[in-house]
Image (spheres, rainbow, N blue to C red):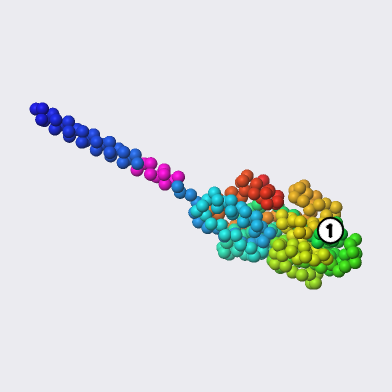
């Protein structure tokens, strides 16, 4: 009888051990999805193409977003605002970047506009140029070719070297709309440059040059002139006193995928708009 009792106790012990082991395995299986969920994050890639004025800002925003989401790659490309509209419309990029409002013929493409920032356009001259202020009419006269000598606007007797942007540039389109208006064309004697940086470098190397660049890229290499007595500053664009300003737009078409939506949500968040401000552009939120 003692032997039978011993056998029963041994069997009971084995059953109990098996039950505990099974319960342990069950618990681990239930915890596994939670662990997988914690490791799972956004993954994929986004291409942003378009305005060279928006490009440096997009690069900073993309860098911060990728740091938060290691599984995501954001490719930022230039090409101009018109190229950005085309890329978004044709699906060549998930996001098109534009530094101007859509043209009438572009508004029917079915693109969704997200205004991510505001920017001013600074009219710039060489730091050695004694001219520090121009009126809107004088700027129009210079860039249309009606005013050709600096002495006509209070400067020295020297020919004005006009530096322009290429066709399709959002900065050019905005400047043309805001300064020249309908019916007035740029002078055909202007030197054309393909980017904001190239305009700035050209003006910095020519005492008689004048050009226009994104306010966010204004630095000590060139001098931003007052326009109608107003300094080209962020505060003055924000309060509306500086009239040469434009929006920075992200353009998408159709329903956004998860990664694209997450990126735009980040850009419009407090953190994203802080980056906009740190890049010397004007937050919209």
Q: Horizontally, is 270 left or right of 197 in the view?
A: left
Q: Secondary structure at mark 1?
A: helix
Residue 30 in the magenta stretch? The answer is: yes
Q: What residue is pinned by disc 1?
A: 136
Question: Which residue appears at 76% of the width and 59% of the height?
Answer: 221
Horizontal and vertical percent position of residue 203: 78, 64
Tell which of 185 and 242 is nearer to you.
242
Q: Horizontally, is 280 left or right of 140 in the view?
A: left
Q: Main secondary structure of the magenta part?
A: helix
Question: Which residue appears at 45% of the width and 49% of the height?
Answer: 40
Q: Which residues are magenta?
A: 29-38
- Residue 185 seen anywhere in this rendered image of the structure: no
Q: Locate the N terminus and report the quarter of the image it occupies.
A: top left
Question: Which residue appears at 62% of the width and 48% of the height?
Answer: 272
Horizontal and vertical percent position of residue 190: 79, 70
Horizontal and vertical percent position of residue 34: 41, 43
Question: Which residue appears at 75% of the width and 50% of the height?
Answer: 234
Q: Horizontally, is 147 left or right of 236 in the view?
A: right
């Amino acid at each position: 009888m003692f032997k039978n009792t011993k056998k029963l106790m041994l069997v009971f012990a084995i059953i109990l051990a098996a039950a505990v082991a099974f319960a342990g395995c069950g618990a681990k299986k239930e915890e596994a999805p939670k662990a997988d969920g914690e490791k799972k994050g956004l993954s994929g890639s986004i291409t942003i193409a378009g305005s060279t004025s928006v490009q440096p800002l997009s690069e900073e925003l993309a860098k911060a977003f990728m740091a938060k989401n290691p599984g995501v790659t954001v490719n930022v490309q230039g090409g101009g605002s018109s190229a950005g509209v085309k890329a978004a419309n044709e699906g060549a990029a998930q996001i098109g970047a534009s530094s101007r409002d859509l043209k009438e013929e572009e508004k029917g493409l079915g693109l969704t506009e997200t205004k991510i920032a505001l920017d001013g356009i600074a009219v710039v001259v060489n730091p050695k140029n004694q001219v520090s202020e121009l009126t809107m009419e004088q700027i129009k006269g210079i860039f249309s070719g009606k005013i050709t000598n600096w002495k006509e606007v209070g400067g020295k007797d020297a020919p004005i070297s006009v530096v322009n942007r290429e066709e399709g540039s959002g900065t050019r389109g905005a400047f043309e709309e805001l300064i020249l208006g309908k019916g007035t064309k740029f002078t055909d004697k202007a030197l054309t440059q393909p980017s904001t940086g190239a305009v700035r470098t050209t003006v910095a190397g020519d005492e008689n040059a004048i050009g226009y660049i994104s306010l966010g890229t204004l630095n000590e290499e060139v001098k931003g002139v007052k326009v109608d007595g107003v300094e080209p500053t962020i505060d003055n664009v924000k309060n509306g006193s500086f009239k040469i300003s434009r929006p920075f737009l992200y353009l998408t078409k159709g329903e956004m995928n998860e990664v694209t939506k997450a990126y735009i949500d980040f850009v419009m968040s407090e953190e994203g708009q802080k980056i906009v401000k740190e890049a010397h552009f004007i937050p919209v939120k």
